[in-house]
Every structure is written in C-alpha cells, then in structure tokens.
Amino acid sequence: MLTEYRSHEFYMRQAITEANKALEKDEVPVGVVIVHGNSIIAKAHNQREMLLDPTAHAEMIAITQASASLQNWRLSDTTVYVTLEPCAMCAGALVQARVKNLVYGAKDKKQGACESTVNLVNDPRFNHRVNVISGVLEDECSLLLKRFFLEKRRGD
C-alpha cells in the first residue's frame, strides 16, 4: 500500500506542476495528468481565460489528449490525477470516457461533483462508475488555490 501511495504522490506532483503553469498564466491553478500503465499520456491545466472557453478546464483538455494518445475515446484503464475535485462537467466527462480511477487533492465544497456537493462519478443510475481516492497532497493543492484567490481579492 505504501508503494501505491507514493505513486499517487508522484503523479499528483506532476499535476501540481501543471497547476503552477495555470497560475503563471493567471488561470485558476488546476492541473491534471492522466496515466495509462505507468506512463503519463496527457497533461493539462486550466485555460479558460486564455482560450475564452468555459469548457477549457484542465480535465477536459487532458481527456482529449489521452483519447488521442490511446486512439480511443474509452479511457477504461486510466487514472486521472487532478489537484481539485472535478466539477459536474468534468465529472460527467470522466464517466463518459469510462475512466477507471480518479485521484484528486483538494475538495471543492462549492462545485465538487465527485463527493462534496453531488457524486456523479458513482451515481448508480449511470452505467459506469469511477474509483475515487481523495486528499492526496491536499494541503499543497489547497494552498495553490487559496493563494490565487487571495491575490485576486487583493487586486493582484
């Protein structure tokens, strides 16, 4: 179990690197990596402001990259590592893509759709469910977000 947890920390640190890229671009600092086997097949960060696209969440971009990498829309043997609990749109996309595992850092008490407000990834009415592990490097992931929003409130 310890080896598995180290693995989760390793990949979450890669997602945090992506979140820092978003922070540098004045985007909400959320980062994602998608792993297939032991390989990272997709990496992304939020790009809503840059692309002027409300769907340009890190998860959505990474899912598109992973599907292209595997040449398949079904991501059934993948693990998604994301710094923030996915919203309803992204949780729905994880279900639609048939993602096997979701590992996330910080909970999103206002919009999180994997445990906090609703649980779309494990809704028994859907034909697919996602295994969820939460709280991996939670403090580091939360700190990025807190720092970003604190600076926004201060007016940069």
Image (cartoon, grey):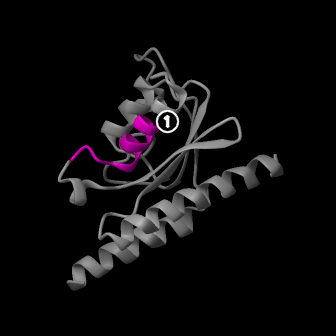
Q: Helix or strand or loop: what does disc 1 sit on?
A: helix
Q: Position of residue 54 (x, y in %)?
A: 21, 47
Outermost residue, right side: 2
Q: Quadrant of the N terminus?
A: top right
Above or below, 70 against 22 in this view is above
Above or below, 131 against 133 in this view is above
Above or below, 124 against 106 in this view is above
Q: Quadrant of the C terminus?
A: bottom left
Above or below, 144 against 150 in this view is above
Q: Position of residue 82 (x, y in %)?
A: 50, 50
Which residue sits at x=73%, y=51%? 7
Q: Which residues are magenta?
A: 54-65
Q: Position of residue 133 (x, y in %)?
A: 60, 44
Q: Position of residue 138 (x, y in %)?
A: 55, 62
Identity of the amino acid at label 1? Ala
Q: Is residue 98 left or right of residue 50?
A: right
